[in-house]
Amino acid sequence: MSAFNDLGGTGGPPLAPLPEDWARALAVAAHPDDIEYGTASAVARWTAQGKQVGYLLATRGEAGIDGMHPERAAPLREAEERAGAREVGVSDVEFLDHRDSVVEYGIALRRDITRAIRRFRPDVIISGAYTVRMIGGLVNQADHRAVGLAVLDAARDAGNRWIFPELADEGLEPWSGVRFVAFAGAERPTHGVEVTGDPLERGIASLAAHAEYTKGLGAEADAFAPRPFLTWIARTAGPALGVEAAVLFDVYQLVPEGPPPWV
């Protein structure tokens, strides 16, 4: 049985398009290259629309290349992340410097992400699945789970002045403007973004910027070559949205759209 046989959301009724009536998004991930495995194509679509997107990375990915010491890998992977971000129109890239592969869910991580949310003041937040199982039933990595859950909690923390009140001393006022958090790579997506054509091409270029990391995968490098891998993923997901190529997300609504049904 192949975990890639079912990418989630492709066997039922068409998914809803992800709302795009917003101006600012913050994409939060555990490692350099996480955003590039699909989400970057959606980011390319959004920046082409004139939206502002920032990246926040919990680590510098220093433990991600087996044959390279972390002290050398960290700056290399940071440079590749910044280069990949530029390919999809993103110049605002921040690193939190949590330790790669042993990121812990907890107050420190929530505070760091809350700080970034209050500073960037996004309308929406994009992250990766935090569940044990993710797309295709694959087992999710520990850092991904910790960061994804912390993102969901920090999206609410950012709007409460009595959570992390020390951030006010840094001049960061509460921000309750996050409408929803969308998780890529989820086992059961709810929404999709069409990336047919140029957005997919720019997403491929974004992942290709991580050449040293991909080379470090050794025998697996060919299996994750940017063009065939991302093209296959996007085209396999496309039918769930009724389009040629798509990126799928599980959306958590924080601010209701319109009045509640009991009013």
Image: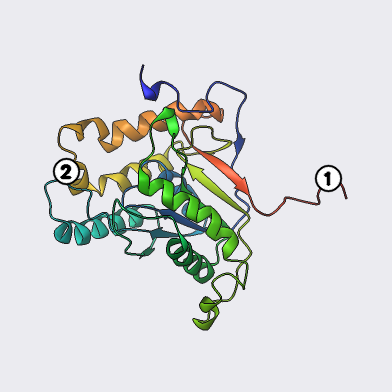
Would you name the residue on which mark 2 appears? 216
Mark 2 or mark 1: whose residue is earlier in sequence: 2
Q: Is residue 24 visible?
A: no
Q: Is residue 233 left or right of residue 120?
A: left
Disc 1 marks a residue whose amino acid type is Pro
Q: What colouring does the structure picture have?
A: rainbow
Seen at 49% across and 50% down, the residue is: 149
Residue 121, x across and y down, in percent: 55, 67
Seen at 31% across and 48% down, the residue is: 33
Seen at 30% across and 55% down, the residue is: 81
Disc 2 marks a residue whose amino acid type is Gly
Dot 2 falls on a residue whose secondary structure is loop
Residue 195, x across and y down, in percent: 47, 39
Dot 1 falls on a residue whose secondary structure is loop
Q: Crowding near pointer 1: few (<14 within 10 Å), some, many (20+)?
A: few
Q: Is residue 17 above or below residue 152?
A: above
Seen at 43% across and 55% down, the residue is: 105
